[in-house]
């Protein structure tokens, strides 16, 4: 992918940014308008999972390989199961699974640790339905950090790990301590430091927000990742969240987790959201789908 193309994407990101004084409701409406529908060859059905609303996404060519839990992005403040559906559907098609895009509770109505509690409840239900060896988990941006936090929380509760996990531009440090938060300020076309600070202020509890932000569930860059399943991390080099992804991958490697890190030079945040309209987004999700599918029993048996 040429840097010129990524520059055009970045220009579009800048043009679509919400005003700094936009209300939460206005931000949610604007984000919802940016994300297209799930592809027509995937059947989307409204349902529930772990006590929360969810969208079930089943490829028309069959989805008998297992299940995939998808956690959408949006800074824990915006986004929904619907905005997560295009990426979830793309992964469902590429892995032969049924994907569930979860509507976990959003801030400020639902503050930390509610998103982790919601995701963990959904994870438990899918574990009971398909078993760990046929279960995958993935997420983008805040949903990427939440995917890792869900596994850390699940491990603490004695739950088995899924077959694999993939995260895209993960927000994994609510303390905002990564060097790229400062170094990429002004280059990242989507976020400023103040944007991230506002999102964190919304989701962190009003009592002891600093302590909560540094906890391994709010900021899994600080978590012990031992025992987690194979991990794929994709990120763009011009993101404020670049160091969140780099530290997450490095910590996984130090914990003897199989990890693949992909950094797209000059790519902005979460290009995977442009699946179906940007060739590199499609290619990134093809690689993610291959990574995840290779860890499922049916695929692994076929490769022997």
Image (tube, rainbow, N blue to C red):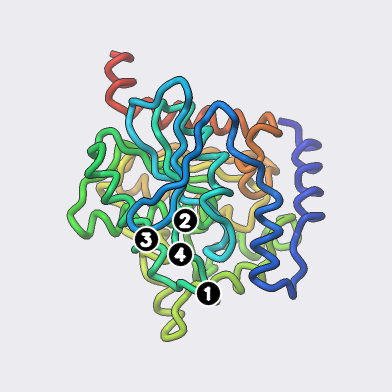
Mark 4: secondary structure: loop
Task: Provide the secondary structure element on which disc 1 rests.
Answer: loop
- The residue nearer to you, when weighing 6 against 63, is 63
Q: Disc 4 designates what residue? A: 105
CA gap between label 2 and label 4 equals 6 Å
Q: Position of residue 271 (x, y in %)?
A: 64, 42
| Residue indicated by mark 2 | 103
Q: Residue at x 63, y 58 (%)?
A: 240
> What is the distance, in whole Å, between disc 2 and disc 3 at their CAs?
9 Å
| Residue holding disc 1 | 108
The crowding category of the residue bearing disc 3, from other C-alpha atoms within 10 Å (few below 14, some 14 to 19, many at least 20), is some
**Residue on which disc 3 sits:** 118
Residue shown at 42% from the left, 66% from the top:
218
Instruction: Evaluate if marks 2 and 3 touch, with contact meaning CB atoms under 8 Å apart.
Output: no
Q: Which of 77 and 145 lies nearest the eye of the viewer?
A: 77
- For marks 1 and 2, the one nearer the N-term is 2
Viewer-nearest of labels 1 and 2? 2
Instruction: Report how far apart the C-alphas of labels 1 and 3 lie in the structure.
Output: 15 Å
Q: Tell me: residue 284, above or below residue 270.
A: above
In the image, residue 209 lies at what x, y percent?
A: 45, 80
User: Which label's residue is closer to the chain start, 2 or 3?
Assistant: 2
Quick one: 252 or 116, which is closer to the camera?
Answer: 116
State yes or no: discs 4 and 3 in contact (Cβ < 8 Å).
yes
- Asked whether, in this view, residue 121 is left or right of residue 209, the answer is left
- Left-right relation of 111 to 215: right
Give the CA distance from mark 4 to mark 3: 7 Å
Q: Residue at x 17, y 54 (%)?
A: 158
Quadrant in which the N terminus appears = top right
């Amino acid at each position: 992918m040429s840097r010129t193309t990524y520059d055009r994407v970045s220009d579009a990101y800048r043009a679509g940014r919400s005003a700094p004084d936009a209300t939460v409701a206005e931000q949610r409406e604007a984000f919802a308008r940016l994300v297209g529908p799930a592809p027509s060859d995937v059947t989307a059905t409204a349902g529930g999972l772990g006590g929360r609303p969810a969208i079930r996404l089943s490829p028309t060519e069959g989805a008998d390989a297992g299940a995939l839990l998808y956690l959408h992005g949006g800074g824990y403040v915006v986004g929904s199961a619907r905005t997560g559906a295009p990426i979830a559907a793309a992964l469902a098609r590429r892995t032969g699974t049924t994907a569930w895009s979860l509507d976990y509770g959003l801030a400020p109505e639902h503050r930390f640790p509610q998103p982790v509690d919601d995701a963990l409840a959904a994870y438990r239900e899918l574990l009971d339905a398909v078993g760990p060896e046929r279960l995958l988990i993935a997420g983008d941006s805040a949903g990427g950090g939440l995917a890792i936090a869900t596994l850390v929380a699940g491990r603490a509760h004695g739950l088995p790990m899924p077959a694999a996990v993939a995260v895209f531009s993960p927000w994994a440090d609510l303390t905002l301590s990564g060097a790229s938060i400062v170094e990429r300020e002004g280059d990242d076309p989507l976020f400023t430091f103040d944007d991230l600070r506002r999102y964190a202020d919304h989701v962190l509890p009003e009592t002891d927000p600093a302590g909560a932000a540094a906890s391994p569930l709010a900021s899994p860059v600080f978590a012990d990742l031992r025992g987690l399943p194979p991990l794929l991390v994709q990120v763009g080099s011009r993101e404020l969240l670049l160091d969140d992804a780099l530290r997450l991958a490095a910590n996984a490697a130090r914990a003897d987790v199989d990890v693949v890190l992909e950094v797209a030079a000059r790519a902005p945040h979460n290009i995977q959201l442009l699946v179906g309209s940007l060739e590199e987004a499609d290619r990134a999700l093809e690689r993610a789908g291959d990574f995840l599918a290779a860890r499922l029993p049916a695929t692994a048996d076929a490769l022997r």
